[in-house]
Image (cartoon, rainbow, N blue to C red):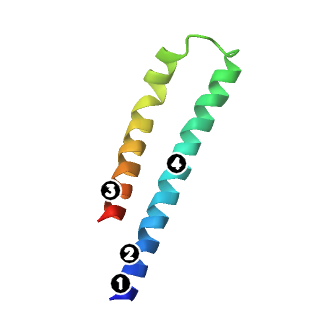
Amino acid sequence: MLHDNDAQDEQQKSAYDACWFELEIVNALALSEWESAGNPSDWAAAWNERYREDAEELIANLCEILRQKKQ
């Protein structure tokens, strides 16, 4: 039984790492675009249009991975 838990823990860690990596990519793309646009003070519209949906989906996935870990 311990082996099963170890395998499950490793799967959850891999899923967490992959999701976190994707979040970092979204962040890096948004930051690069923001900097290329001259660091505008009103960035909400661009963020919402191009990055928010991906970020929300990834955060939901990350939360689900963390909830599974608690069980």
Which mark identifies residue 67? 3
Around disc 2, counting alpha carbons within 10 Å, would you say few (fewer than 14), some (14 to 19), or many (20 or more)? few
Q: CA distance from mark 1 to mark 4?
A: 27 Å
Gap in angstroms between the C-alphas marked 3 and 2: 13 Å
Q: Is the residue marked by circle 3 packed among few (<14), some (14-19), or many (20+) residues within 10 Å?
A: few
Give the secondary structure at mark 4. helix
- For numbered disc 2, what is the local secondary structure? helix
Query: Of the residues under marks 3 and 4, which one precedes in the sequence?
Result: 4
Give whichever of discs 1 and 3 has the lower sequence position: 1
User: Mark 3 is on which residue type?
Assistant: Arg
The residue that mark 1 highlights is 4
The numbered mark, 3 or 2, whose residue comes first in the sequence reads 2
The mark found on residue 22 in the picture is 4
Number of marks in the image?
4
Q: Is residue 54 above or below residue 46?
A: below
What whole-number distance in Å separates the C-alpha atoms at marks 2 and 1? 6 Å
Say the numbered circle drawn on residue 34: none
Q: Residue at x 63, y 12 (%)?
A: 40
In which quarter of the view is residue 4 placed?
Answer: bottom left
Q: Label 4 is placed on what type of residue?
A: Glu
- Identified at 37% across, 87% down, the residue is 2
Is residue 42 depicted above or below 49 in this figure? Answer: above
Amino acid of disc 2: Gln
Foreground tag (1 vs 4):
1
Secondary structure type for disc 3: helix
